Image (cartoon, rainbow, N blue to C red):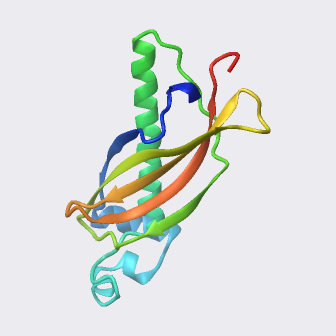
Amino acid sequence: MRFFEDIEIGQQREIGSYTFTPEAIKTFAAKFDPQRFHLDEEEGKNSLFGGLAASGWHVGSACMSLLVADGQRLAREAAARGEEVAVWGPSPGFRDLRWIKPVLAGDTISYVNEVIEKRASGSRPGWGILTARTIGTNQRGEDVYSITASAFVPMRKGG
């Protein structure tokens, strides 16, 4: 992963795609969001969604999984090049979570992350706070999900 000083506002990265199968939708819903339109095709068809719909929490969880996997990939690549790898801290939170359109069985959502703000942390010397917006777009080019989240990012030694 990159250090705070290496990150520019406006930088984007494609973090990956996830296909929401009926089985995955039902499995997630049964465990975490057991509403009828997430568990049964007929109930989904008869709902406002018009089909078996993924839980918004499932859409967000898929995003988080891809974000972490992409960060791990970037860290491995940097280490292979002999670069020092920045170990990021936790997230102080998120805002503006939006489920814009339903994600239905068979949809593939591609997620893109864009840096929108960065600042030095006032309470944690040697750390910056990075804010990024991640947008999920379906195979028809429609935005279906967005979230704005922050993370603590280490500064280079002496930063």
Residue 57: image x %, image y %?
Answer: 48, 64
Q: Residue at 46%, 24% (x, y): give it.
A: 75
Residue situated in front as seen by the camera: 22 or 120: 120
Q: Quadrant of residue 25?
A: bottom left
Relative height, residue 86 to residue 8 (above, below): above
Q: Quadrant of residue 42?
A: bottom left
Residue 123: image x %, image y %?
Answer: 79, 38
Decide if residue 45 is on the left or right side of residue 157. left
Decide if residue 54 is on the left or right side of residue 8. left
Residue situated in front as seen by the camera: 30 or 2: 2
Relative height, residue 159 to residue 53 (above, below): above
Q: Residue at 53%, 20% (x, y): give it.
A: 85
Which residue is most to the right? 123
Q: Residue at 44%, 43% (x, y): give it.
A: 67
Q: Quadrant of the C terminus?
A: top right
Residue situated in front as seen by the camera: 86 or 53: 86
Which residue is most to the bottom? 46
Residue 156: image x %, image y %?
Answer: 62, 19
Residue situated in front as seen by the camera: 45 or 82: 82
Which residue is most to the top? 82
Relative height, residue 80 to residue 26 (above, below): above
Residue 51: image x %, image y %?
Answer: 27, 79
